Image (cartoon, rainbow, N blue to C red):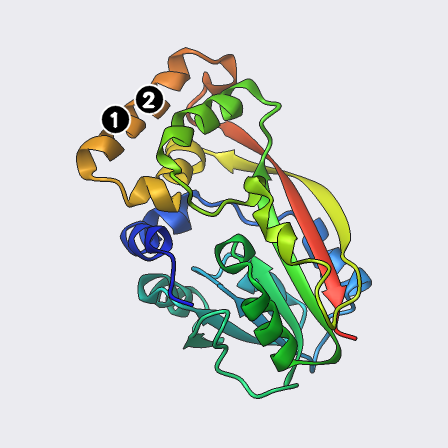
């Protein structure tokens, strides 16, 4: 399966803003890894579609041996710089460069919607050991916040069929042969910092926004900057709190 054009183009252009603008993950993620999924030292785990390594550091913290797999070279370069000790390899969800039944868990953080297909699920099942875990993770913008909803409205005209978590199409591959039913949890999360990083860089790192011609990208940037004057929650540009829901779902190979 080729890499989606919006992902290939957008993430190649925006790997720097992705690092600056994308949120990390809430502290509860570490407890979920340790206590719910029982990820521990000595296990072999894959970060599939690892991007720049935002989630990778949580897997490292579990003590497991981490293999990061990413198809976009610019993102992989960023990951290697931030996590030089991690084995980072080029690969895609339908061609994971690992042996069959060789890993204990495969994590897809902010990535599964890009490659949600039976082919990808079958490839994940191939590399998992019996009883192995497939886990999907997303930071989802909390649109109950007025200015976050407005950000979504600004972006919507440019989606043009780009795979997104909120479309829900990723769910169509479940239930999946050879896997138990999905389990789900949600955690509250906030990304706090300067407007430039947590809002502007966040939106400019969205694949289909980053892939736009510069003139259209500039238009989007101007609309985002204008929000500062429209919403009280953005009044202090030096300290903005961007609300998210971190959604996790997982299943076991049977």
How many numbered circles are shown? 2
Name the spot of residue 238 as percent of width and height, x first.
43, 27
Which residue is found at the position 28% from the left and 23% from the top? 222
Secondary structure state at the residue bearing disc 2 = helix
Q: Give percent across and percent down for residue 192.
A: 53, 35
Relative side of 145 to 159, left or right: right
Residue 72 falls in image quadrant: bottom left
Considering depth in this image, is 212 or 77 the residue closer to the camera? 212
Residue 55 placement, left or right of 206? right
On the picture, is 105 further left or further right than 88? right
Residue labelled with disc 1: 219
Which is nearer the eye, 47 or 40? Answer: 47
Quadrant location of the C terminus? Answer: bottom right
Marks 1 and 2: CB-CB under 8 Å?
Answer: yes
Residue visible at 54% across and 64% down in the picture? 56
Question: What quarter of the picture does the N terminus occupy?
Answer: bottom left
Residue furthest to the bottom: 99
Q: Could you tell me residue 177's position as x and y percent?
A: 72, 69
The residue at the point 34 percent across, 50 percent down is 6
Q: Is 228 placed above or below 36 here?
A: above
Q: CA distance from mark 1 to mark 2?
A: 6 Å
At 49% from the left edge and 75% from the top edge, which residue is drawn?
A: 86
- The local crowd at label 1, few if under 14, some if 14 to 19, many if 20 or more residues have their Cα within 10 Å, is few
- On the image, which quarter does residue 151 sit in? top left
From what the image shows, is residue 102 above or below residue 188? below
Mark 2, other Cα within 10 Å: few <14 / some 14–19 / many ≥20: some
What label sits on residue 174 in the rendered view? none
Indicate left or right for 195 with 178 as reference: left
Residue 197, given in percent of the width and then of the height, sits at 40, 37
Q: Which residue is mark 2?
A: 223
Q: 109 above or below 122?
A: above
In what element is the residue under mark 1? Answer: helix
């Amino acid at each position: 399966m080729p890499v989606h054009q919006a992902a290939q183009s957008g993430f190649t252009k925006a790997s720097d803003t992705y690092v600056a603008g994308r949120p990390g993950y809430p502290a509860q993620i570490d407890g979920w890894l340790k206590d719910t999924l029982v990820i521990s030292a000595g296990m072999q785990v894959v970060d599939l579609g690892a991007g720049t390594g935002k989630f990778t550091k949580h897997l490292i913290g579990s003590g497991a041996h981490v293999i990061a797999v990413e198809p976009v070279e610019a993102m992989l370069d960023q990951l290697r710089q931030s996590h030089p000790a991690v084995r980072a390899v080029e690969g895609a969800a339908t061609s994971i460069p690992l042996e069959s039944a060789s890993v204990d868990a495969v994590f897809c953080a902010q990535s599964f919607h890009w490659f949600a297909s039976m082919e990808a699920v079958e490839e994940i099942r191939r590399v998992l050991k019996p009883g192995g875990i497939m886990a999907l993770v997303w930071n989802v913008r909390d649109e109950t916040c007025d200015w976050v909803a407005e950000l979504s409205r600004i972006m919507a005209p440019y989606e043009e069929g780009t795979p997104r978590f909120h479309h829900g199409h990723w769910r169509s591959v479940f239930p999946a042969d050879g896997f138990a039913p999905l389990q789900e949890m949600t955690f509250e999360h906030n990304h706090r910092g300067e407007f430039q990083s947590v809002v502007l860089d966040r939106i400019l790192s969205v694949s289909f926004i980053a892939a736009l011609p510069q003139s259209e990208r500039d238009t989007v940037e101007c609309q985002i900057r204008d929000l500062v004057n429209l919403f009280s929650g953005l009044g202090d540009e030096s300290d903005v709190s961007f609300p998210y829901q971190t959604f996790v779902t997982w299943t076991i190979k049977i």
